Image (cartoon, helix red, strand yellow):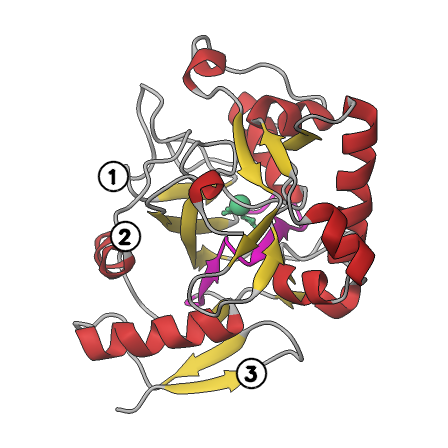
Amino acid sequence: MAITVTPIHPHIGAEIGGIDLSLPVGAAAVKELWGAIDRHCVLVFHGQDISDAQLRDFAALFGPLEIGRAAARPGRRRLQFPEIGDISNLDEDSHIRARDDRRRLDSLGNRLWHTDASYMPVPVVLGMLFAVAVPPAGPFGAGETEFADMRAAYDALSDRQRALVDPLVAEHDVFWSRGQIGFTEFPPGEREQYPPSRQRLVRSHPGSGRKGLYLSAHASHIVGWPVPEGRLLLRELDEHATQRQFVYSHKWAVGDLVIWDNRCTMHRGRPHDEMQPRDLRRATTLDVGSTLDEAA
Ligand code: OGA
Ligand code: MN
């Protein structure tokens, strides 16, 4: 079976065909998929039927796996493997979480444009989301996940804008991003466990050599700038980078797997009918070093 790669948007995203992820995936296929990731930043697979163990093992072919903030907490979880993030509105017993459930309110932070784990000193590379249950639409969305192309956004800046942002470093802090939506009730100890991290504002994407903005809701200010000024610059760049022409909106169907490269995208979840289950499973690969050590 030959892997097919079909672009689905002028800038970002391609649909992958000709591969069944429930079967063993060899090194040649992984290499082809890396090529497609480097070119398109977002890959969409339809009609897959995989368990959490298969998702974990497939993701591990692309790098060491992250154990996310929620999975690192003590206590019972709905999902078995700590490498599989629970991106759902369900509690340990698979019931819809109450409206004021702290885990639910924390995860609503995913509705802001962000890159995953940019508050970690060594952030993550690939996110892989697999759809197990998809909710009906609500008045403001159908639970889509949207992806914005940070390389196209960078390319669309003027020369003067690029010269300004190229050398800058931003501080990223999960307490800042959650605070923006008024969520402050973190479990004891998490503030100490996840201190802010500094990241380059512009990164060179290793697989393509293209530069991209490295933005995220976690980014709280620009190092060395007065806080209000840096915050306004970040806002300006967020608005620029999330214009519709840079965005692919993924409308989920059960059995979809979406892979994105956090080094060249931002993403956000959209609202949906909150009374119905939405169940996505996420595996995430880790990067090897700080963005501060990358060449500009
Ligand atoms: C994520 C995320 C958005 C969504 O899993 O990292 O941001 O649509 N998800 O659930
Ligand atoms: Mn995310």
Q: Horizontally, is 52 left or right of 163 in the view? A: left
Q: Is residue 21 above or below residue 107?
A: below
Pointer 3 with pointer 2, Cβ within 8 A: no
Does mark 1's beta carbon lie closer than 8 Å to ligand 1?
no
Amino acid found under the numbered disc labelled 3: Pro
Disc 2 target residue? 52
Q: CA distance from mark 3 to mark 2?
A: 27 Å
17 is higher (above) or lower (below) than 151: below
Residue toward you, 203 or 255: 203
* Contact between labelled residues 1 and 3, with CB atoms less than 8 Å apart: no
Q: Quadrant of residue 168?
A: top right
Closer to the camera in the image, 14 or 274: 14
**Is 209 one of the magenta-colored residues?**
no
Discs 1, 2 touching: Cβ within 8 Å: yes
Name the residue carrying label 1. Answer: 80
Tell me where the magenta segment starts and ends, as one range.
Answer: 255-276
Give the Cα distance between marks 3 and 1: 35 Å
Question: Is 85 on the left or on the right of 159, as rendered?
Answer: left
Task: Please give the name of the residue rendered at 32% of the width and 36% of the height, measured from the top-left corner.
Answer: 67
